[in-house]
Image (spheres, helix red, strand yellow):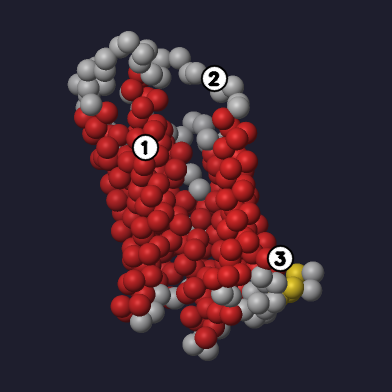
């Protein structure tokens, strides 16, 4: 799962530079209009349709003992499994935190630049690549998503460490790093949480479906409902930024998400003996 997610992270790693340097080369973010977004959105829609067509024709294997047969009636509600239900909530918080950092860190960077505080990369305030000024905000986003990609490749080798331990360690470190970034208003520290976020998805998924046997297939579908946290938390953070007049303290939202995932790792993911019988 980590290896597959790393491929996904490769796309999100190159996306900021692709958008900044290719689609809107030389155009300031505040100068982009809604009409200029129509063609990129159309191309994204086309990619989704092509992907749907390809996957619908793939002959995917049916994993044994992960679902009930068509005539068998399941005795328990899928929501009766506490560790799964709390796992859905955990992935809601995880994707919310992951996406909030990825999409809002550049807006915070622009705020710092406009306020005169500035951001530099090895002493430079501009990143020039192949003649294009890709900007520090795009670099921050790329470093964050790149951290997820590298982390997933590295953690795919950690087969002997349990998901509970990995989730406990990474959420604790991520919470500490985010607090340091908030206090110091340092976005370079903030984007380093990408390394910690890299392994959280696979840990939460593994813990959430553990021991479910013939309920596993249905549970996996239920689990995916939690990803809409990525559509909720970035917006909430934006509203909070407008209310507070800045982005610095809005990152406490991410800290709250990390703390819930820490709770899930230590308490919420534990299975009662009678649950999966």
| Distance between the alpha carbons at the discs numbered 1 and 2 | 20 Å
- Left-right relation of 15 to 253: right
Determine the secondary structure under disc 2. Answer: loop
In the figure, 66 relative to 229: above or below?
above
Q: Which mark is residue 223?
A: 1
Residue nearer the viewer, 46 or 149: 46
Could you say whether the residue bearing mark 1 is in a helix, strand or loop?
helix
Q: Is residue 122 visible?
A: no
Q: Quadrant of the C terminus?
A: top left
Q: Which dot, 3 or 1, sits closer to the camera? A: 3
Q: Residue at x 32, y 79 (%)?
A: 244
Q: In the displayed structure, does residue 165 sit left or right of residue 119?
A: left
Q: Which residue is mark 2?
A: 61
Residue at x 34% of width, y 65% of height: 236
Residue 274 percent location from the top left of the image: 20, 21
Spatial distance from mark 3 to mark 2, Cα to Cα?
A: 39 Å
The answer to which of 236 and 179 lies nearer the viewer is: 236
Label located before the other in sequence (1 or 2): 2
Would residue 77 be visible to someone looking at this image? yes
User: Tags 3 and 1 in contact by the CB under 8 Å rule?
Assistant: no
Instruction: Provide the residue designation for mark 3.
Output: 22
């Amino acid at each position: 799962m980590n290896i597959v997610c790393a491929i996904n992270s490769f796309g999100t790693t190159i996306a900021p530079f692709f958008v900044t340097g290719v689609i809107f080369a030389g155009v300031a973010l505040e100068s982009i209009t809604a009409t200029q977004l129509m063609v990129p959105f159309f191309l994204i829609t086309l990619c989704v349709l092509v992907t749907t067509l390809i996957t619908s024709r793939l002959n995917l294997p049916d994993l044994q003992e992960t679902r009930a047969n068509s005539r068998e009636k399941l005795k328990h509600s899928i929501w009766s499994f506490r560790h799964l239900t709390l796992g859905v909530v955990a992935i809601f918080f995880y994707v919310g935190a992951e996406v909030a950092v990825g999409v809002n860190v550049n807006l915070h960077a622009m705020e710092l630049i406009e306020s005169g505080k500035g951001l530099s990369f090895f002493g430079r305030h501009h990143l020039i690549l192949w003649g294009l000024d890709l900007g520090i905000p795009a670099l921050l986003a790329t470093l964050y998503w790149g951290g997820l990609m590298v982390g997933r490749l590295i953690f795919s080798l950690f087969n002997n460490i349990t998901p509970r331990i990995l989730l406990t360690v990474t959420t604790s470190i991520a919470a500490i790093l985010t607090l340091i970034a908030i206090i110091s208003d340092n976005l370079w520290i903030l984007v380093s949480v990408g390394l910690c976020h890299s392994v959280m998805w696979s840990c939460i998924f593994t813990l959430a479906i553990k021991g479910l046997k013939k309920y596993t297939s249905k549970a996996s579908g239920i689990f995916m409902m939690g990803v809409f946290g990525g559509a909720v938390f970035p917006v909430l953070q934006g509203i909070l930024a407008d209310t507070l007049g800045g982005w610095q303290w809005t990152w406490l939202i991410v800290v709250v998400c990390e703390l819930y995932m820490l709770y899930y790792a230590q308490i919420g993911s534990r299975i009662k003996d009678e649950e999966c019988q």
